[in-house]
Amino acid sequence: MDAKIFVVAAAVFVLGVAHALAGAPEPRGLWTGAMHGETPATLAGATVIDVTEASKLKAEGALLIDVAEAPSKPPGASSDMPWLPVHMSIPGAVWFAGGGFGGGGPAFQRRFAARVAELTGGDKKKSIVAFCHPRCWGSWNAAKRLVLLGYGKVYWFPGGVEAWEDKFAAAPVKRDKAWEEGDR
């Protein structure tokens, strides 16, 4: 009897570990749910990379797109309190603040496509790395958008800035002005 319980408990544990390693299932399209949480381990049409591969692609001249959300002013802060947050990222990355939202309408989609086309010179074979933070759907969505736009060398770096900082120095980056101007 005890052996059966042990076998069942071991099987449940193994299945739980396998699910955790597999991540969430890939949605058919862009993810429109909560931005932070378990993400898939895969992204059809893109290559999932780690920090070593991200560093290699950076050295080879890949376009690095950081889609992390802009930091919010602390709750309860007065409206006249200066707010000058610093966003740390991979040196040389282009920061599309909030560029990974899945529910962006047609104008958002066009703006994303136009800015990427401008940065790649229209080269659909240019290597592009999308990232933000671990357990964030923003970079998954950005990489998925790139795949849907027909880019052939799309890399998703789910470890994001935190994985980069564990091995290399991050640097402050400013929001991409051309991306920001598209908000107006």
Image (cartoon, rainbow, N blue to C red):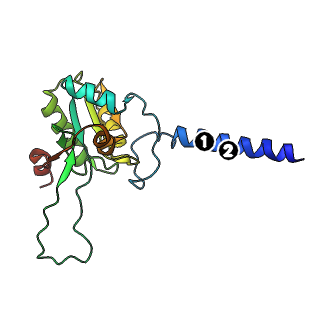
Q: Are marks 2 and 1 in contact (CB under 8 Å)?
A: yes
Q: Which residue is mark 1?
A: 17
Quadrant of the rendering where the C terminus is positioned: bottom left
Residue 13 marker = 2
* Image quadrant where residue 152 sits: top left
In this rendering, the answer to whether 18 lies above or below 180 is above
Number of numbered markers: 2
Disc 2 marks a residue whose amino acid type is Phe
Q: Find numbered disc 1 in the image and state the secondary structure of the residue it sits on.
A: helix
Residue 119, percent from left and from top:
14, 33
Q: Residue at x 34, y 41 (%)?
A: 163
| Nearest to the observer: residue 164 or residue 45 | 164
Side (left or right) of 6 relative to 53: right
Residue 54, percent from left and from top:
29, 30
In this rendering, the answer to whether 23 lies above or below 105 is above
In this rendering, the answer to whether 121 lies above or below 96 is above
Query: Crowding at label 1, few (<14), some or many (≥20) Cα neighbours within 10 Å?
Result: few
Residue 104, percent from left and from top:
29, 50
Query: Crowding at label 2, few (<14), some or many (≥20) Cα neighbours within 10 Å?
Result: few
Q: Residue at x 20, y 22 (%)?
A: 60
Residue sticking out furthest to the right: 1
Q: Find numbered disc 2 in the image and state the secondary structure of the residue it sits on.
A: helix
| Nearest to the observer: residue 86 or residue 179 | 86
